[in-house]
Image (cartoon, rainbow, N blue to C red):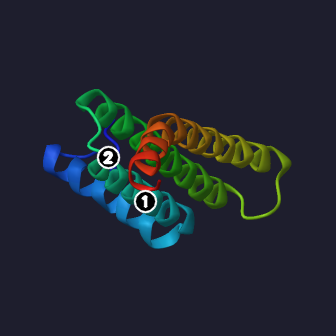
Amino acid sequence: MKSEFKNRNFLSSFKNAISGIRHTYKNERNILIQSIFAVIAIICGIFFKISLVEWMILAVVIFIVLICELFNTAIEDLSDAVDENYNEKIKMVKDVAAGAVTLSSLLSVIVGIMMFLPKLITFLNIYGG
């Protein structure tokens, strides 16, 4: 038995995925904040002329954060559709999903410090004094 929600082809799948991403950007403030930090990190990468390996690490970390936020939004929306009333188990599921976003964000901060702090110190030593 086929689900009426099953995508018929690749283009349908792609359109639905873009719709989900658009929904998250439209309805979730945190993904906008995370995206601003991603743009700042990209600008820092350009400014400090980071290596190809550093670009790959930066891209992976940025996408991990955004993917976690998309999953978090999906879990929140599904949970709210299942039961709009307070439910301790649903609260815990939402908290766990939020925890994944928090950990991925912490990872991005750690990677950002490890990647850019030495470059910033060198830059300040050369141009600052």
Identify the residue position indicated by label 1 in the image. Answer: 35
Inspect the image, locate mark 2, and give the three-letter code of the amino acid beneath it. Answer: Phe
Front position among marks 2 and 1:
2
Q: Which mark is residue 15?
A: none
Outermost residue on the bottom side: it is 26
* Residue 96 point in image, percent of width and height: 70, 40
Measuring 56% from the left and 39% from the top, which residue is drawn there? 104
Query: Residue at left 29%, top 27%?
Result: 53
Q: Amino acid at mark 1?
A: Ser
Residue 94, x across and y down, in percent: 70, 48
Looking at the image, the residue that sits furthest to the top is: 53
- In the rendered structure, which disc, 2 or 1, sits on the residue that comes first in sequence? 1
Label 2 – label 1 distance at C-alpha = 20 Å
Name the residue carrying label 2.
48
Query: Quadrant where the N terminus lies?
Result: top left
Marks 2 & 1, CB-CB < 8 Å contact: no
The correct choice, above or below, for 83 with respect to 61 in the image is below
